[in-house]
């Protein structure tokens, strides 16, 4: 049965939300030069704005957001979250101090923490298990689309805006060029937040509360939801380790601008256009391919079908990330990076799709929040930082490519091994959840 057109339009809104979230995350890095000069920031303060200021609230608020999404209207929570991060983006346009700018980035992290738990929960109740990966693929394609637009349009747009006369606003007065960028970035998101209120709020069809215990309002308590995940750690472990590996390797791309400059002599503009085209082109192919492969596996009756697609993806990501930093030329490095992106598309679709198979509607948002909170914390610790430490240890800035390749191998090979060994536990976990869903349905019918 084909999903109604309205449902696919709703998934399209989730795609836009995903793209907008990555644009808003990337925006400060485009403006850091004028921000630093205007507010007199040091490099430590700049580092806080680009990393921890967003990540702290994004990680810590994910669990409360997931808990609320399992109990209340997901579309309303999502609309409110989008509105919060867009208002906070606009607040940055009024910032005249480091403190206010830091507060705005904390607020962006707070709003974006609700996006994935709400979105995956909605998609899981809009689509049956075999069709779900295609919808997840469309939503996750917003990640690369947002990144592509940042590379292709963000830089030129910022360069154009700084040539304009200073903007004067009622009640605010004159604002700097970088402030006007933040002020202009917020309103489109507020329109998206309003549109999100129009998406259908589906019933939670895959419930286990009657089987494991629920309160009078048919909600599973937070402790029970966390115990549900903890007691099935063997099923979650291969997915968590594999996805943490692919995500950590993915963060190495933050070094790409420096890599292409140091190793291949590319300037920022040349690399930016190339990277933007790769993000856009590979994303247009990779995500639909990932959704099709995963759905085909599930329709063939393979309970671990999505995990097979994930294994294929990370098996592309690891050798590609070892190759492209060590490539003999910039052209070959770009080809290797394109394969890296293809593998990331497969992982980015198959990971969340696999997670939906291990969860039920009444705990899915909470488990999703815990899952992505773990991934975010791991990627912060073992992402780009060890590369910098290795380069310093080698004592040669030109060794950046070697450092990236070493970290990719050290992270990627063990992640693949754990993933392969975990297939039986993952299949048992999927079977257990399906049995709980069936048992819960029987108890609800008898009641």
Image (cartoon, rainbow, N blue to C red):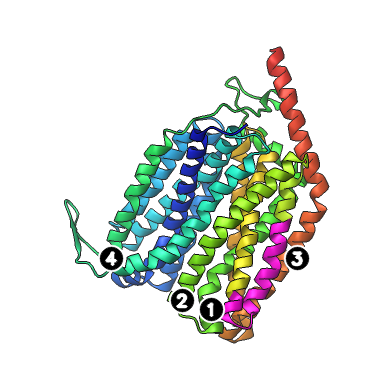
Spatial CA distance of label 3 from label 2 is 32 Å
SS label for mark 1: helix
Q: Is residue 277 above or below residue 129?
A: below
* Residues shaded magenta: 312-333
Membership of 324 in magenta stretch = yes
Q: Earlier in the sequence, mark 1 or mark 2?
A: 1
Spatial CA distance of label 1 from label 2 is 9 Å
Q: Position of residue 400 (x, y in %)?
A: 59, 79
Residue 71, disc: none
Spatial CA distance of label 1 from label 4 is 27 Å
- The front one of 14 and 407 is 14
Label 2 sits on residue = 270
Residue 260, disc: 1
SS label for mark 3: helix
Regarding residue 382, the answer to whether it shows in the image is no
SS label for mark 2: helix
Q: Earlier in the sequence, mark 1 or mark 4?
A: 4
Q: Earlier in the sequence, mark 4 or mark 3?
A: 4
CB contact under 8 Å: marks 4 and 3: no
The residue depicted at 53 percent of the width and 39 percent of the height is 118
Label 4 sits on residue = 161
Q: Earlier in the sequence, mark 1 or mark 3?
A: 1
Left or right of 176 on screen, residue 153? right
The residue depicted at 58 percent of the width and 70 percent of the height is 385
Instruction: Classify 10 Å Cα crowding around label 2: few (below 14), some (14-19), many (20 and above).
Output: few
């Amino acid at each position: 049965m084909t999903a109604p057109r309205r449902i696919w339009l709703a998934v399209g809104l989730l795609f836009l939300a995903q793209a907008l979230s990555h644009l808003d995350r990337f925006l400060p890095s485009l403006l850091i030069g004028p921000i630093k000069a205007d507010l007199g920031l040091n490099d430590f303060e700049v580092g806080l704005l680009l990393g921890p200021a967003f990540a702290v609230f994004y990680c810590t608020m994910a669990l409360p957001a997931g808990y609320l999404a399992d109990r209340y209207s997901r579309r309303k929570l999502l609309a409110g979250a989008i509105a919060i991060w867009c208002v906070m983006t606009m607040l940055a346009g009024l910032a005249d101090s480091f403190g206010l700018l830091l507060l705005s980035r904390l607020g962006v992290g707070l709003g974006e923490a609700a996006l994935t738990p709400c979105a995956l929960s909605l998609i899981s109740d809009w689509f049956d298990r075999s069709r779900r990966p295609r919808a997840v693929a469309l939503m996750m394609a917003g990640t690369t689309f947002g990144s592509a637009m940042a590379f292709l349009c963000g830089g030129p747009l910022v360069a154009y805006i700084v040539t304009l006369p200073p903007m004067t606003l009622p009640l605010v007065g004159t604002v700097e060029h970088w402030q006007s960028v933040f002020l202009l970035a917020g309103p489109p998101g507020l329109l998206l937040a309003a549109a999100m209120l129009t998406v259908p709020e589906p019933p939670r069809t895959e419930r286990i509360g009657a089987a494991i215990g629920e309160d009078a309002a048919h909600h599973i308590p937070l402790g029970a939801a966390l115990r549900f995940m903890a007691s099935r750690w063997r099923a979650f472990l291969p997915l968590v380790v594999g996805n943490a590996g692919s995500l950590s390797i993915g963060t190495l791309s933050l070094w790409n601008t420096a890599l292409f400059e140091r190793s291949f002599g590319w300037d920022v503009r040349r690399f930016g256009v190339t990277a933007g085209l790769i993000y856009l082109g590979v994303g247009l192919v990779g995500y639909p391919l990932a959704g099709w492969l995963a759905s085909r596996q599930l329709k063939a009756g393979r309970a671990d079908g999505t995990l097979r697609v994930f294994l294929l993806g990370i098996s592309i990501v690891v050798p590609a990330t070892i190759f492209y930093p060590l490539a003999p030329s910039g052209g070959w490095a770009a080809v290797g990076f394109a394969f890296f992106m293809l593998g990331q598309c497969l992982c980015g679709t198959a990971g969340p799709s696999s997670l939906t198979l291990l969860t039920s509607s009444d705990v899915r948002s909470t488990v999703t929040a815990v899952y992505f909170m773990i991934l975010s914390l791991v990627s912060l610790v073992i992402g780009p930082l060890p590369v910098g430490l290795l380069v310093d240890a080698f004592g040669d800035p030109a060794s950046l490519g070697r450092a990236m390749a070493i970290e990719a191998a050290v992270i990627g090979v063990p992640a693949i091994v754990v993933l392969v060994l975990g297939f039986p536990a993952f299949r048992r976990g999927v079977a257990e959840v399906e049995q709980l869903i069936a048992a819960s349905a029987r108890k609800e019918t008898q009641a």
